[in-house]
Image: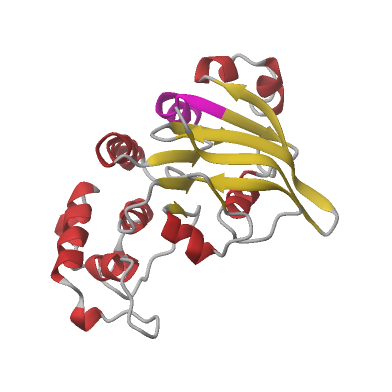
Amino acid sequence: MNALLEVDRVSKSFGGVAANREISLSVPAGAVHGLIGPNGSGKTTLFNSIVGHHPLDAGSVAFDGTRIERMTVPRIARLGLLRTFQQTRVYGAMSCVENMQVSAPHRTAHGGVLLRRVPAAVTERAEGLLEFVGLAALRHHRAGSLSFGQQKLLEFAMALMFRPKMLLLDEPTAGINPTLINGMIDRLVRANAELGVTLLVIEHNMRVVMNLATHIYCLAHGRLLAAGTPEEVRNDPRVVEAYLGGE
């Protein structure tokens, strides 16, 4: 399959400390790939580098055939590449459906959002996606009143409002209860299969990433340590030593 995301020898340092060092990876359209590694290995920095949160020191990033490493975050999002965060970023004082509405890519001439005149199609899509993630019954509840796991589902649905081609998900199951973990996995699988969204997932829950991804990259000390199928990565001695702590 053709690569939707192509990361080529990306490097990024902060104050002389190398967070990413010549990392290369490729994600085909329609795939679900995983990104693992111990804390401090550079996973979140790599996500930030890909979507334009900070400039690269070296290397390049191409998305859907277009070089994006010098683009702004909003411009990259308009191309169809978005990310979610470890800590949820929802508007706590707004209802779930209002969070969905302000996430839609429709704006006034001055760049603002007019909630009082939200197109019917936007509200319809918002309601449909809340149903998709299992939050339809809570659509008029304040987002701040939701559990952490429910907020993660809401943030996922908010990202889907953009009709993304690809999502970078930063620990989507971290900090949520086992029941909601299964629900999140199901929504990720369905988003990939039914909505055609390509996924690259940072995940510390090895059961989740091994069952979800068809290809896994492992980082350690800012470098790409290993890559392959879940079985190959699970049995790689370097991964066992660096990520799982040896025997």
Relative image position of residue 28 (x, y in whole percent)? 47, 32
Horizontally, is 65 left or right of 41 in the view?
Answer: left
Rendered view: 83 above or below 229: below
Residue lying at 40% horizontally and 80% vertically, measured from the top left: 111
Colour theme: secondary structure
Q: Does any portion of residue 191 appear in the rendered image?
A: yes
221 above or below 210? below
Asked if residue 220 is among those painted magenta in the image, a careful observer would answer: no
Task: Using residue 13 as the reference point, say whether residue 126 is left or right of it.
Answer: left
Q: Position of residue 38 (x, y in %)?
A: 65, 36
Q: Quadrant of the N terminus?
A: top left
Question: Could you say which quadrant of the image residue 182 lies in?
Answer: top left
Q: Is residue 55 above or below residue 217?
A: below
Count of marks, rendered view: 0
The magenta segment is 206-216
User: Image point 34% across, 39% down: which residue?
Assistant: 188
Single out the residue that lies furthest toward the bottom: 110
Q: For the view shown, which residue lies furthest in the right direction?
A: 16
Q: Tell me if residue 88 can be seen.
A: no
In the image, residue 240 lies at what x, y percent?
A: 66, 20
Residue 229 lies, with reference to residue 221, above or below; the image says: above
Q: Looking at this view, is 23 or 201 the one in front?
A: 23
x 43%, y 47%: residue = 167
Q: Main secondary structure of the magenta part?
A: helix
Q: Is 108 in front, or is 205?
A: 108
Q: Quadrant of the C terminus?
A: top right
- Which residue lies at the image location 68% right of the left edge and 25% below the top edge? 245
Q: Nearer the viewer, residue 238 or 58?
A: 58
Answer left or right for 175 relative to 190.
right
